[in-house]
Image (spheres, rainbow, N blue to C red):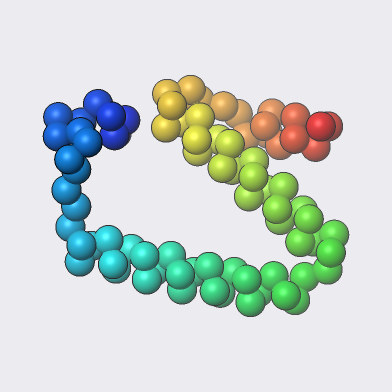
């Protein structure tokens, strides 16, 4: 996927509202389930889950930017900061 500002129609982008609406609904549903489930975790478990999610986000973001990071090294680095 290319950066938005590199798209031929930038900054006049178009999108499929029906698909976007569906994706938004699925995201909201998943977020609700995740928030509800997290209420049953201890503080330590919730903190561990946050670290895992942030580590995965770092790996995913780096992949978008064309850099492949090792998830374990990201997790290890975030645990030492």
Decide: is 10 above or below 57.
above
Q: Is residue 39 left or right of residue 32?
A: right
Decide: is 72 above or below 52.
above
Return the x and y of residue 4 as percentages of the image width and height.
29, 34
Q: In this view, does 78 lie to the left or right of 70?
A: right
Q: In this view, does 63 lie to the left or right of 3?
A: right
Find the residue positioned furthest to the front: 11
Q: Nearer the viewer, residue 69 or 28?
A: 28
Decide: is 59 above or below 22.
above
Return the x and y of residue 77 as percentages of the image width and height.
75, 29
Return the x and y of residue 36 as percentages of the image width and height.
63, 77
Residue beneath the point at 77% across and 70% down: 41
Residue beneath the point at 56% across and 42% down: 57
Residue beneath the point at 20% across and 62% down: 17
Q: In which quarter of the image is residue 34?
A: bottom right
Q: Which of 56 and 8 is in front in this view?
A: 8
Residue beneath the point at 50% across and 35% down: 61
Q: From where the camera sits, is residue 10 visible?
A: yes
Q: In which quarter of the image is residue 74?
A: top right
Count of marks placed on residues? 0
Quarter of the image for the N terminus: give it.
top left
Q: Is residue 64 left or right of residue 17?
A: right
Q: Which of 12 and 49 is in front in this view?
A: 12
Return the x and y of residue 31 as percentages of the image width and height.
53, 68
């Amino acid at each position: 996927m290319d950066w938005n500002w590199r798209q031929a129609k930038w900054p006049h982008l178009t999108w499929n509202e029906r698909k976007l609406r569906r994706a938004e609904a699925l995201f909201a549903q998943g977020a609700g389930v995740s928030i509800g489930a997290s209420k049953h975790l201890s503080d330590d478990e919730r903190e561990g889950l946050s670290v895992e999610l942030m580590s995965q986000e770092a790996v995913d973001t780096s992949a978008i930017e064309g850099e492949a990071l090792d998830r374990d090294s990201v997790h290890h680095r975030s645990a030492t900061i």
